[in-house]
Amino acid sequence: MVITLGAIMVAGWVWSAMTGSAAYDCLHGVLNSSIGKVLMIFWTLCTSYHLLNGIRHLVWDCGYGFDLSQVYGSGKGVLAGTVLLTALVWLAGG
């Protein structure tokens, strides 16, 4: 749900940029507020987790990583990668 709502929010931001400065300024103000930033960071966190866990499942589909220690290790790697990827996205963006 969070990923879908965030994607709709990003699509709305792109749409507002195409329609004119008034719509863009309004939505930019909402997204640039403290609550908007928290929501967008949470969306980035969820999207990063979904991406990295999807890669983990692709590795499993290839038949690798089923030992219990590997399952726990890849789970911890997904969580660490999620935090790192989210931080990189937001630090690179400004």
Image (cartoon, rainbow, N blue to C red):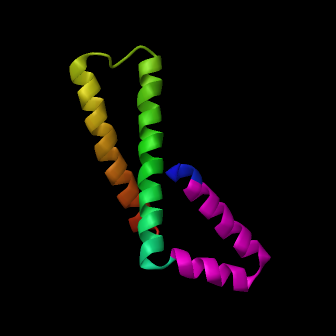
Q: What range of the chain is rendered magenta?
A: 5-31
Q: Does 94 sit above or below residue 7?
A: below
Asked if one can make out residue 94 in the rendered structure from this viewpoint, the answer is no
Task: Give coordinates of residue 10: x percent, y percent.
Answer: 61, 62
Give the number of callouts: 0
- What residue occupies the far right of the structure in this picture? 19
Q: Is residue 7 magenta?
A: yes
From the viewer's side, name the closer residue of 36 and 74. 36
Tell whether 68 sits left or right of 47: left
- State which quadrant residue 55 falls in: top left
Q: Is residue 6 magenta?
A: yes
- What residue occupies the far front of the structure in this picture? 1
User: Which residue is depicted at the point 64% across and 84% down?
Assistant: 25
Task: Give coordinates of residue 22: x percent, y percent.
Answer: 71, 86
User: Which residue is depicted at the point 47% across and 68% down?
Assistant: 93
Q: Does 17 sit above or below residue 71?
A: below
In the rendered image, which quarter contains the C terminus?
bottom left
Task: Give coordinates of residue 14: x percent, y percent.
Answer: 69, 67
Q: Does 55 sit above or below residue 18?
A: above
Asked if one can make out residue 6 in the rendered structure from this viewpoint, the answer is yes
Q: Main secondary structure of the magenta part?
A: helix
User: Which residue is depicted at the point 28% across and 24% down?
Assistant: 71
From the viewer's side, name the closer residue of 16 and 89. 16
User: Which residue is depicted at the point 60% across and 63% down?
Assistant: 9
